[in-house]
């Protein structure tokens, strides 16, 4: 082959490649709207991340089967943060900067949210956490950070009085997971304050705590048992709370337990069925109502078929939350006429942010949703009592803030 | 309450003793910190649970846990230790770390990251002696620990295999010159330590009746501390140091504050390392570890 | 224009590089430290206190924290002299855990709730520090100081016989390493603008050691290669979804099997030197 011919072939090949490259984004531009999600699909919360993934895939299919958004196809890019906060921040950067998503659902944990929300503000992309409930996390990161959860202090204000009334509680002992930021805040600050408000005496004068991952809490439970409170506050993620409840049962301490949303799960019902557990939730799998029942009916079989998830799995509060978050984004995109075109990206993202800040009465799975000035959700919640293997809804509350309409 | 806390401490101590022994078997003989032992412990627990949930008897669960963990230990020995025999000690340590990462991932994918719980606990009869309540499972754990430690001590002190183990521990090259098959000995050491960790996993898992793929992590670090305090080359040292640390921990929680618990335990370990590096029961000054 | 995703990853590499170097410095004298996350934590909390509460500019805060951490490193270095090999490693492990437990209980700096308020630093700033310290170490490696350190590592008794003060060298290495780890911590704190005790756990210390061993434990730039590997590999393994970590563990074992001195070693640099001369 002569050098002229080879050069010509090179030029032709390059030209063809450039033409294809130029054509491709043009096609993608009008055809796709991208949303992002950050979930922990590996690590200690792998199950939540994988269940969240199935939930989002369900929503994506539902939307696309229904014709997409404004004529464009929905694509949800889901990234795993491996339960490492540093990975969550890089995930947001990738989703926002490289994948050009209009908004991000996630991250899940408060530790990840604390470092990812500042990045959301830096990248001017809305990020909404589906599970973070450590007080103040979104508040510190306005205006681009939101959380589809309710501050534990607000939830406790309804859960604790119910707890006191139902079991005639005059004294409690508080035990919490000192290594978990949310659990430590709830157990160390919020619950003691709530007890004081409700005139319940906290019998342990020094804090009773354990560390995430501890297998043995016998010393702490023995100490609690000796103090003989009427009830126990267990502030910990349910996988750790299981350890405490089982130890309580083992030592014969059958007292009612109250805690934060971190307790909500099916695992905790199996730990000690005789011990009544009171915890607030915005959603639970056996909830009554058109929307939640339809959601569970569609999602549950998909979850149970997924490899790596236990066969008896049920849709959790976090699945419901992330479904709502993505649905809100989609509504925002429809309402604001966002097109997903790269040149409108910044404007589209700002429109979503403003839509969410003003959101009121959005039809969520458990009731209407809005957001308050702190970025936390205004939605209905339920105080659940878990006993003998099932959750029972006892009280309905609303996290409405002054100046915003209620539920 | 004090007596009850003592029982709590002794149970916790039994946990530490078994895992510390697993560490020290490989540490004392080969000078290697096998970071995969914590996951062998966790794996033993999962194997044991699987057997119990199939309504098979406890001894079978124990055998399953020990055998399963021992087999995985052999794989780790072949891939993670043998090739690094002549390398500085940090290399096999890191390769066992690689294995522990793999094991955690595999278990998470097979059994899920949520706690695996036993519907009905095993051996739940409780005995009350003068205000102190202890369960049959707890007694089994403590009893089994003593039996396993004694059995191990017997193997190491009285059998020819044990002599071979001690010979390699003292001086690998001379032992080989004297006809000891060093590679066979290290294989046995790994297997024994794996079986011990697996047994610990079954017993302890069944006692607490709820396990996750991450139960090994926190307990592993403390068990290393126990190994150091008891003396890395002393089997009976682990039997004494385990309950000692277990009781220390429990008393700190009961009377001090649960917050400073870790501080106290690791502080004590450092103190022992500085004042008596050979451990409480250690003989000669064995702080001259191999070059890292 | 670099994508902010890669910028974020590079920032992580720079921070990990400094942590890895802190282990490398101490390792050069034959001491394995499994607790450098503790020094990183001290640096992170101290710099954050200085910039947020005392209003000190970040560069000065980093220097102060490094000096203070270095002093603590020297204090740790003295008792460390009595221990060798894996026993020293375990003692440093204990030290790291104690530091973490300390910060977990330090209510003034947030305890388990973490600490906020730091302002953001740029990627360029992080790499100015990282590159400067890497350069410093590369220069030192060619100097008499490093030769002395290697002599102490290879045979302490012999080193003493030729007049080297093993004590000064070993303790000094601890101090230097602690100072570098503190800078890593301070940069970490101002990059993520939020810190909590869980950031400075045994897992972090192990990451530092991994970076050094994988990248090359006998040359300074090995830490750079190792840090890049540890940050980038999990990203490239994303396609493996839920087997990402298992693949990482397997790769770790494989890399050690294939090349146990790490990716870079002195022989490689000699090759480059020869080529330049030719």
Image (tube, coloured by chain):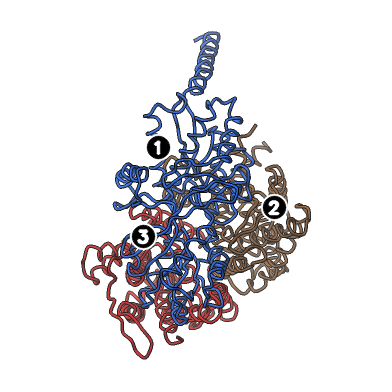
Chain colours: A blue, B red, C brown
Q: Secondary structure at mark 2?
A: loop
User: Mark 1: few, some, or many residues within 10 Å (few <14, many ≥20)?
Assistant: many
Q: Secondary structure at mark 1?
A: helix
From the top left corner, tell me how far across and down residue B181 is, in percent.
35, 67
Disc 2 versus disc 1: nearer the observer: 1
User: In this orientation, does residue A335 appear?
Assistant: yes
Residue C189 as seen in the image, left or right of residue A231: right
Disc 2 versus disc 3: nearer the observer: 3
Residue lying farthest to the left in this orientation: B56
User: Mark 3: few, some, or many residues within 10 Å (few <14, many ≥20)?
Assistant: many
From the top left corner, tell me how far across and down residue A128 is, in percent.
53, 44
User: In this orientation, does residue B81 appear?
Assistant: no
| Vertical arrangement, residue A220 with respect to residue A373, above or below | below
Which residue position holds label 2? C118
Which residue position holds label 3? A267
Residue B47 as seen in the image, left or right of residue C188: left
Residue drawn at x 64%, y 67% as measured from the top left: C107
Which residue position holds label 1? A59
Chain-order first, disc 3 or disc 1 = 1
Q: In this orientation, which residue lies closer to the viewer: A132 or C254?
A: A132
* Circles 2 and 1 in contact, beta carbons < 8 Å: no
């Amino acid at each position: 082959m002569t050098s002229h011919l080879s050069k010509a072939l090179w030029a032709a090949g390059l030209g063809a490649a450039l033409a294809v490259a130029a054509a491709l984004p043009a096609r993608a531009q009008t055809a796709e709207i991208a949303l992002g999600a950050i979930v922990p699909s590996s690590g200690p919360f792998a199950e939540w991340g994988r269940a969240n993934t199935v939930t989002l895939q369900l929503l994506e299919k539902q939307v696309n089967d229904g014709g997409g958004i404004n004529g464009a196809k929905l694509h949800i890019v889901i990234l795993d943060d491996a339960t490492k906060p540093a990975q969550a921040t890089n995930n947001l950067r990738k989703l926002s900067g490289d994948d050009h998503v209009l908004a991000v659902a996630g991250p899940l944990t408060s530790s990840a949210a604390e470092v990812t929300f500042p990045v959301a503000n830096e990248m001017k992309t809305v990020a909404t956490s589906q599970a973070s409930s450590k007080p103040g996390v979104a508040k510190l990161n306005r205006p681009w950070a939101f959380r589809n959860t309710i501050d534990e202090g607000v939830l406790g204000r309804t859960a604790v009085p119910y707890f006191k009334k139902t079991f005639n509680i005059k004294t409690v002992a508080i035990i919490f997971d000192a290594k978990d930021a949310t659990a430590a805040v709830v157990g160390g600050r919020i619950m003691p304050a709530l007890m004081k408000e409700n005139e319940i005496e906290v019998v342990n004068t020094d804090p009773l705590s354990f560390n995430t991952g501890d297998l043995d809490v016998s010393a702490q439970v023995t100490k609690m048992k000796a103090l003989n409170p009427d009830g126990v506050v267990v502030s910990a993620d349910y996988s750790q709370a299981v350890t405490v409840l089982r130890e309580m049962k083992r030592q014969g301490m059958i007292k009612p337990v109250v805690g934060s949303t971190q307790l909500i799960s099916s695992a905790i019902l199996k730990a000690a069925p005789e011990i009544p557990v009171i915890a607030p939730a915005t959603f639970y799998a056996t909830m009554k109502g058109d929307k939640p029942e339809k959601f569970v009916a569609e999602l549950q079989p998909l979850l149970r078929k997924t490899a790596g998830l236990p066969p008896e799995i049920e849709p959790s509060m976090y699945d419901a939350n992330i479904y709502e978050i993505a649905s809100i984004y989609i509504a925002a995109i429809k309402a604001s006429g966002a097109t997903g075109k790269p040149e409108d990206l910044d404007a589209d993202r700002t429109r979503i942010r403003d839509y969410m800040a003003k959101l009121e009465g959005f039809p969520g799975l458990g009731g209407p949703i809005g957001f308050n000035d702190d970025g936390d959700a205004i939605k209905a919640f339920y105080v659940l009592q878990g006993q003998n293997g099932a959750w029972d809804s006892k009280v309905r509350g609303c996290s409405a803030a002054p100046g915003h309409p209620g539920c | 309450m004090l007596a009850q806390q003592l029982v709590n401490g002794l149970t916790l101590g039994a946990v530490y003793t078994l895992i510390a022994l697993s560490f020290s078997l490989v540490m004392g003989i080969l000078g290697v910190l096998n970071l995969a032992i914590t996951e062998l412990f966790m794996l033993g627990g999962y194997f044991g649970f699987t057997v119990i949930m199939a309504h098979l008897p406890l001894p079978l669960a124990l055998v399953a846990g020990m055998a399963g963990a021992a087999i995985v230990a052999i794989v780790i020995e072949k891939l993670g230790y043998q090739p690094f025999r002549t390398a500085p000690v940090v290399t096999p340590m890191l390769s066992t770390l690689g294995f522990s990462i793999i094991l955690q991932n595999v278990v998470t994918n097979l059994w899920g990251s949520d706690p695996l719980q036993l519907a009905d606990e095993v051996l739940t009869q409780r005995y009350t002696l003068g205000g102190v309540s202890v369960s049959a499972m707890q007694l089994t754990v403590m009893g089994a620990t003593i039996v396993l430690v004694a059995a191990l001590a017997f193997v190491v002190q009285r059998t020819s295999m044990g002599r071979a183990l001690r010979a390699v521990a003292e001086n690998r090259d001379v032992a080989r010159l004297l006809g000891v098959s060093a590679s066979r000995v290290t294989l046995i050491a790994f297997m024994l330590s794996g079986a011990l960790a697996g047994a610990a996993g079954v017993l302890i898992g069944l006692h607490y009746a709820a396990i996750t793929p991450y139960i090994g992590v926190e307990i592993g670090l403390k068990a290393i501390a126990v190994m150091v305090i008891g003396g890395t080359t002393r089997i009976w040292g682990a039997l004494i140091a385990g309950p000692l640390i277990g009781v220390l921990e429990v008393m700190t929680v009961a009377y001090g504050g649960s917050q400073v618990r870790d501080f106290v335990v690791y502080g004590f370990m450092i103190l022992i390392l500085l004042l008596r590096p050979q451990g409480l029961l250690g003989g000669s000054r064995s702080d001259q570890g191999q070059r890292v | 224009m670099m994508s902010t995703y890669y910028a974020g990853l590079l920032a992580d590499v720079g921070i990990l590089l400094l942590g890895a170097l802190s282990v490398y410095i101490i390792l050069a004298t034959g001491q394995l430290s499994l607790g450098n996350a503790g020094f990183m934590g001290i640096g992170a909390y101290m710099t954050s206190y200085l910039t947020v509460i005392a209003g000190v500019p970040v560069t000065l805060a980093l220097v102060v924290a490094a000096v203070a951490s270095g002093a603590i490193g020297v204090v740790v270095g003295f008792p460390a002299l009595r221990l060798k090999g894996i026993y020293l490693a375990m003692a440093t492990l204990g030290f790291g855990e104690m530091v973490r437990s300390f910060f977990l209980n330090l209510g003034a700096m947030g305890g388990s709730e973490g600490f906020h308020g730091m302002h953001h630093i740029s990627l360029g700033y992080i790499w100015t520090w990282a590159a400067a310290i890497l350069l410093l170490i590369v220069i030192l490696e060619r100097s008499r100081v490093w030769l002395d350190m290697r002599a102490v590592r290879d045979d302490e008794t012999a080193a003493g016989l030729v007049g080297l003060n093993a004590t000064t060298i070993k303790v000094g290495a601890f101090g230097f390493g602690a100072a570098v780890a503190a800078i890593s911590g301070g940069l970490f704190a101002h990059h993520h603008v939020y810190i909590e005790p869980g950031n400075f756990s045994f897992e972090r210390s192990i990451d530092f050691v991994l970076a050094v061993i994988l990248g090359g434990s006998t040359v300074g730039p090995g830490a750079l290669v190792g840090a890049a590997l540890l940050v980038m590999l999990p990203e490239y393994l994303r396609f493996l979804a839920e087997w990402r970590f298992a693949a990482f563990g397997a790769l770790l074992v494989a890399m050690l099997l294939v090349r146990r001195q790490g990716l870079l070693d002195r022989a490689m640099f000699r090759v480059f030197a020869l080529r330049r001369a030719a």
